[in-house]
Amino acid sequence: MKNVNCKIRDIDEFGGAVLDLTPSELAELGFELGDTLDFHFSNGTILEKVPYYNGYYTELGVPVLVAYPGYTYPTINLNGGNFTHQSGVRSRDSVTIIMHEKGGKKDVMDLRGVVYSNDPEDYRTLDQFANARMFCPGKIAPGKLYRCASPFDRIMNRPDAVSAFLENNSVRSTLSLSESDNTLKLSYADMPSYSKKIYESGCAVPLRMGADYFSEAFREKLVSGLCRIMEKPLPWAIHCLEGKDRTGFVCVVLGAFMDAGHQELVDDFMVTYDNYYGITEASDSFRYNGFRNTFVEKYLCIFREADPDGQSFRKGAEDYLRSGGMSDAQMEKLRDLIS
């Protein structure tokens, strides 16, 4: 198989390098999901044995080429990291793609390469389609916090279902991890009426977060958003595009901050995998444990390390927020508001 040269089309919001080739074009050239690839960038960066998946199925910090469903071009990034920030790769740089091993990670792709439908008719309920639910582990009071997919962005076809959920639960403000002021303005004309009401009231707090969860930039932006939403009326909803990855991480932080236990945090995090893919511990324990161990268990392990007894996640969450600039007084205010 010949090596392939292409350009970096763009740098996405997560710091990923977007290839100027579609998945179909890659397939025509012989590169398929489950292969492992080497990448030689024009700035001298070399990545070897990079798996090609349709999702982030590597360990945290490990490079992956992802052809995410719903997106036109695949992206090279670090799972939970920021590849271009670390490597210096920029838009319009060139890259040579080399086959490392045909089907080198096909076993992982076959087991974890799940996709979901954007048709509400394929789901048991509209709330499941919206990936929407109350979030009240630990000492978070019922009816204060909710989590969901985006009530504004129609790329995954969920705003109508999400907006109905928010209205039914009288949600008044959103911590919008995936939105910016500009994307909200662009989405305004096509927003569902209740989403429009939240936006018009100035109660949508847009953060446009990446996915480098333990970076200084992510921590500082999250703390800034939490401080802003503390001035907005409750109940609040936390969302990103799917209400899955960024939302899942932020909910782990807030749940740990509010004394939630291990099982509560794992159970809530994994509801998303039931909602989108029908994956539960009972129905598909292998995939369930794979996603659990790759994501939520890794986050909790990091937070647990801050507790000398290794029993609580609260100190780890407090240290995380404090390192993002949240004062003790602001933490106390946040705790009072949602308890």
Image: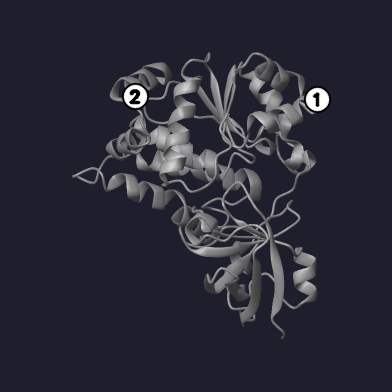
Residue 151: where, in percent of width, then height? 68, 29
The residue shown at (19%, 44%) is: 309
Provide the residue designation for mark 2.
Answer: 331
Q: Is mark 1 on a helix, strand or loop?
A: helix
Asked whether 263 or 291 is in front, the reply is 291
The disc at residue 155 is none
Whether 87 is drawn above or below 175: the answer is below
The residue shown at (68%, 60%) is: 92
Asked whether 127 or 243 is in front, the reply is 243
Direction from residue 76 to residue 234 in the image, left or right: left
Q: In which quarter of the image is residue 324?
A: top left
Quarter of the N terminus within the rendering: bottom right
Q: Quadrant of residue 205?
A: top right
Mark 1–mark 2 Cα distance, whole angstroms, equals 36 Å
Provide the residue designation for mark 1.
Answer: 189
Mark 2: amino acid: Met
Residue 208: where, in percent of width, then height? 58, 37
Q: In which quarter of the image is residue 109?
A: bottom right
Direction from residue 36 to residue 289 in the image, left or right: left
Q: What element carries label 2?
A: helix
Quarter of the C terminus within the rendering: top left
The residue shown at (60%, 75%) is: 37
Q: Which residue lies furthest to the bottom in this view?
A: 1
